[in-house]
Image (spheres, rainbow, N blue to C red):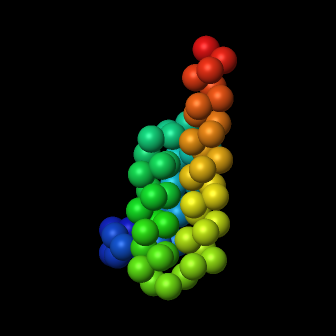
């Protein structure tokens, strides 16, 4: 889907979540941030808010892990 339409917010979200599950946190954050921006541009405010919450949770997890190490 992304090859045909690189601005497909849902596909970017799905790929971001897949990267996260595969421990590709930087790639996941990049896709999720781009997805959130596209959702906002498409006036999909609920989807935007949900993705932003996921991004915040991921960033907080990274901070917590750094403090442990």
User: Residue 53: x and y, percent?
Assistant: 64, 58
In the figure, 5 relative to 69: above or below?
below
Nearest the viewer among 49 and 11 is: 49
Q: Quadrant of the N terminus?
A: bottom left
Query: Going 34% across and 70% down the picture, which residue do you hit?
Result: 6
In the figure, 48 relative to 44: above or below?
above
Residue 44 seen from this side: yes
Viewed as shown, does residue 65 lie left or right of 3? Answer: right
Classify residue 45 by image quadrant.
bottom right
Nearest the viewer among 33 and 28 is: 33
Query: Going 63% across and 77% down the picture, which residue do you hit?
Result: 46
Query: Going 49% across and 75% down the picture, which residue do you hit?
Result: 39
User: Residue 56: x and y, percent?
Assistant: 60, 50
Nearest the viewer among 22 and 53 is: 53
Classify residue 67 by image quadrant.
top right
Query: Going 48% across and 49% down the picture, which residue do you hit?
Result: 29
- The count of marks equals 0
User: Residue 58: x and y, percent?
Assistant: 60, 44
Q: Quadrant of the C terminus?
A: top right
User: Residue 41: x and y, percent?
Assistant: 41, 80
Viewed as shown, does residue 6 lie left or right of 52? Answer: left
Viewed as shown, does residue 5 lie left or right of 44? Answer: left
In the figure, 54 relative to 67: above or below?
below
Viewed as shown, does residue 53 lie left or right of 28? Answer: right
View extreme (top): residue? 69
């Amino acid at each position: 889907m992304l090859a045909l339409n690189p601005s497909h917010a849902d596909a970017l979200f799905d790929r971001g979540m897949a990267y996260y599950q595969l421990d590709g946190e930087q790639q996941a954050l990049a896709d999720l941030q781009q997805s959130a921006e596209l959702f906002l541009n498409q006036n999909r405010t609920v989807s935007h808010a949900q993705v932003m919450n996921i991004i915040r949770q991921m960033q907080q997890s990274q901070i917590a892990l750094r403090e442990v190490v």
